[in-house]
Amino acid sequence: MKKITYKTPIVEMQGDEMTRILWDGIKELLLEPYVKLNTEFYDLGLENRERTADKVTSDAAEAIKRFGVGVKCATITPNAQRVEEYKLSEMWLSPNGTIRAALDGTVFRAPIMVKGITPYIPTWTKPITIARHAYGDVYKNAELSVGAGGECELSVRYADGRTERKPIYKFGEHGGVIQGVHNKDDSIASFARSCFNYALDTAQDVWFGAKDTISKTYDHRFKDIFAEVYEREYKPRFDEKGIKYEYSLIDDSVARVVRSNGGFIWALKNYDGDVMSDMVATAYGSLAMMTSVLVSPDGKYEYEAAHGTVTRHYYRHLKGEETSTNPIATIFAWTGALARRGKTENNAALVDFAERLERACIATVERGIMTGDLACIFKRDGVTARTVTSREFLKAINATLQEI
């Protein structure tokens, strides 16, 4: 069978632990027999990040800027225990954070829906895509513990010497805590553009929620910038596509989401997105069944699985034990990248292959063949869940792929 080809390389970023093992199996069994992969390869495994003083991560980010499409394996973000385990010279930053900052991108996460794995909220019949503004707020805050009698104020000093001050609180006989958070107009605008571009690409409405009635300057700034960018740059294209943008207060937004059928992009500030992405993933059934794509304001795409490196399974693998590790989200990272490259090159064969491979993954599970994490939550009339090893599951998907 003639392999499908494409012209422009996809940036391939290898990762760590069990997902690294799955990565090679996916390429061997599901991709290379059908597609002549053309990739620019970067090893983001922790050992190579240590060898290159993490330069490999920034190099990979620059490559995504050049080629426009990347696919990334899950990677370790080291903590103190990992520094000791891997004998690291320092606690290297999260590769995801480095790449996200380099691309000024927004992360979109959506569930992979399968018959037999029913969301805990039964009205959710279509995926909800979480768009998290991964900059600022409490993740780049300054905070202090304040003793009794402390007086706190905001102070802004400008280059021309002006200073603006605003009281926060005067503590009495009991102390407390304070924190300062910030955001940037250009980052908020980039977040809005990424959301609106992704909505046009996927033909979905955008819902954005914040608390501007309480946070009359900070949250209101998000609301205003979203509205300005939408009206000035996107509304005609949204109207033409038959999709819409809506703003509501975050508490109203949560209530609407719970009552909805899904099928939209839910744009959220950093902390809200952090919390709600895990809630949505759990409600749909499994974090191992969540896609993740980083989209820059100028249309660069980086695909990966939403989960981590599955450390527990990796230690079992090192002992020579078979594992039943779910590869679906990682497969969908590859199919997302291949489909995106196919769209940029008008390569219908590549897009069709990516879509067929996704259908093969879903159909295999719906037939009752799956990894252990899904078997414990799968319920479908007339179908009995059968747990298989990771490699057996990849082979079963390949068999299904050849049928459809």
Image: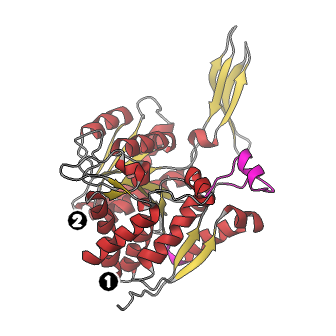
Horizontally, residue 260 falls left or right of residue 110, namely: left
Q: Which element is circle 2 on?
A: helix
From where the camera sits, is residue 356 visible? no
What residue is at 36 percent from the left and 73 percent from the top?
Answer: 398
Q: Distance between the residues labelled 1 and 2?
A: 27 Å
Q: How many C-alpha atoms fall within 10 Å of the one at disc 2: few (<14), some, or many (≥20)?
A: few
Is residue 100 magenta-colored? no
Q: Name the residue under label 2.
A: 240
Marks 1,2: beta carbons within 8 A = no
Horizontally, residue 32 falls left or right of residue 98, namely: left
Q: Name the residue under label 1.
A: 349
Q: Which element is circle 1 on?
A: helix
Is residue 77 magenta-colored? yes
Percent coordinates x, y for residue 145 in the rendering: 71, 24
Instruction: Please tell me which of labels 1 and 2 falls first in the chain.
Output: 2
Percent coordinates x, y for residue 250 in the rendering: 38, 36
Percent coordinates x, y for residue 297 in the rendering: 47, 63
In the image, residue 233 above or below residue 209 = below
Q: Nearer the viewer, residue 378 or 234?
A: 378
Q: Which residue lies furthest to the left in this view?
A: 382
In the image, residue 291 above or below residue 373 = below
Q: Quadrant of the N terminus?
A: bottom left
Looking at the rendering, the stretch of residues picked out in magenta corresponds to 67-93
